[in-house]
Amino acid sequence: MRYGVVVLGLVIGLSACRKPEITVVDVPKNAPRQSVAFSSKSNQSRFRYHLPTGWSATDPGPMRLAQFSVPAGRSTAVLSVTTLSGDAGGLLSNVNRWRGQLGLGPISDGDLQQSIKLMTSNGLSFRMIDMANPGTGKRVIGAVAQTETDTWFFKLEGESGALDGTKPQFEAFIRSVEVAQ
């Protein structure tokens, strides 16, 4: 009887030890990138703005709709514009991601709501947030607007003190933004 159980165990065990099938797919080097959640490139024609004097467009890379070089005191800040489908995970998770990039810990929804400044322009409601890490001297000033289909992120990153003089220009830029529905 023991012999039969051992043989049966071996048969079952060996039949389960098949080599996994490997599928190889050739992707052309310059194949277009696609993403279900990311919708920036399709939104380029919907996005209009007035660029402040001295700001210049730079290569946005694959994940951004637009990117700008922004003079900020003796340094240069970067403004990135990104759109994601739907609510993009929610404002709190995105602000906490930005905080993590600055080396700051997460905040609660209550703390977030207390730190938001609301701005409405051209039919869009922007939630403005300003956060800095005194230890690193880095700062992010962000504006987030949600449309019926997308969430638009405007993120100005730079040296904390240098962004003080740039913040009014950033707010003027945000007031100029138009997104066609």
Image (spheres, rainbow, N blue to C red):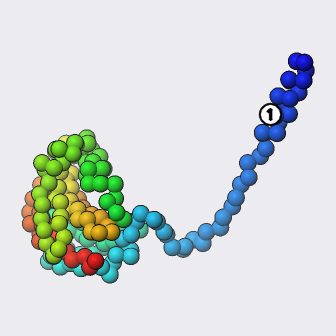
Q: Under tag 1, what secondary structure? A: helix
Residue 30 placed where, x, y %? 54, 74
Quarter of the figure with residue 5: top right
Q: Residue furthest top?
A: 2
What residue is drawn where x is 86% and y is 33%?
A: 11
Left or right of 16, for residue 136: left
**97 and 151: which is toward the camera:** 151
Residue 80 visible from this viewpoint: no
Circle 1 is placed at which residue position?
13
Disc tally is 1
Residue 123 visible from this viewpoint: yes
What residue is drawn where x is 21% and y is 51%?
A: 138
Left or right of 151, for residue 42: right
Residue 122 placed where, x, y %? 16, 76
Quarter of the figure with residue 179: bottom left
Quarter of the figure with residue 69: bottom left
Residue 88 vertical placement versus 101 (above, below): below
Residue 1 vertical placement versus 84 (above, below): above
Q: Residue furthest front?
A: 1
The residue type indicated by label 1 comes to Gly
State the quadrant of the N terminus: top right
What residue is drawn where x is 26% and y is 42%?
A: 106
What residue is drawn where x is 12% and y is 60%?
A: 118
Residue 170 placed where, x, y %? 15, 67
